[in-house]
Amino acid sequence: MVLRKRLVPFVFALFWGVLPCAHAAQNYDLKEITPTVQNAIQSRQARYSQLQHLKSEGVIGESNQGFVSMLKELPDVSGIIAAENQDREVIYQAVVDQNGLGQGGLGQVKAIFAEVQRGKAQPGELIQLPSGEWVRK
């Protein structure tokens, strides 16, 4: 299935909400939702409520690299984090590949997604600022 969408609406579909950001002016198109990307999206949707619960408990937070990070050691959490981050990596790489962003593109895409995630974090959730500092929103 071929889709032409700007990055920010794509972010909305993947991350259930969007924060307008400075990067929105960059017109990255997602040209195709491959089966691998579709699987990553569906897997993320299936674990969304688990992640939200873990965030609200302060067990995990949104890093400045566009991934979730464990902040408190709990059994069975590392598998959820690994699966989420692997799915995010698949999606990020698809955006990079489909837009010919090259070697530096992955870092740029991660930064955009991290900014979006920080913006939509709920009050009290832990987020990592671009400086590396962890704070409660």
Image: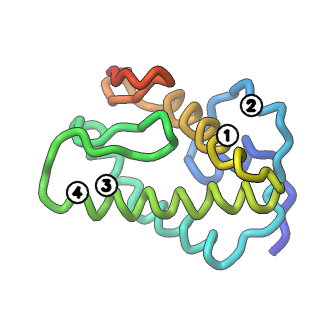
Q: Residue at (65%, 59%) from the top-left corner? A: 93
Which amino acid lies under the numbered mark 4 shown in the image of this protein?
Val
Res. 12 visible in picture: no
Q: Residue 23 shows which numbered tag?
A: 2
Q: Are marks 1 and 3 in contact (CB under 8 Å)?
A: no
- The disc, 3 or 2, on the residue closer to the chain's N-terminal end is 2
Which amino acid lies under the numbered mark 2 shown in the image of this protein?
His
Badge 3: how crowded within 10 Å, few (<14), some, or many (20+)? few
Helix, strand or loop at label 4? It is helix
State how far apart marks 1 and 3 are (Cα).
27 Å
Location of mark 3 (residue): 50
Which amino acid lies under the numbered mark 1 shown in the image of this protein?
Gln
State how far apart marks 3 and 4 are (Cα).
10 Å
Q: Residue 108 shows which numbered tag?
A: 1
x, y (%) of residue 4? 87, 58
Badge 4: how crowded within 10 Å, few (<14), some, or many (20+)? some
Location of mark 4 (residue): 77
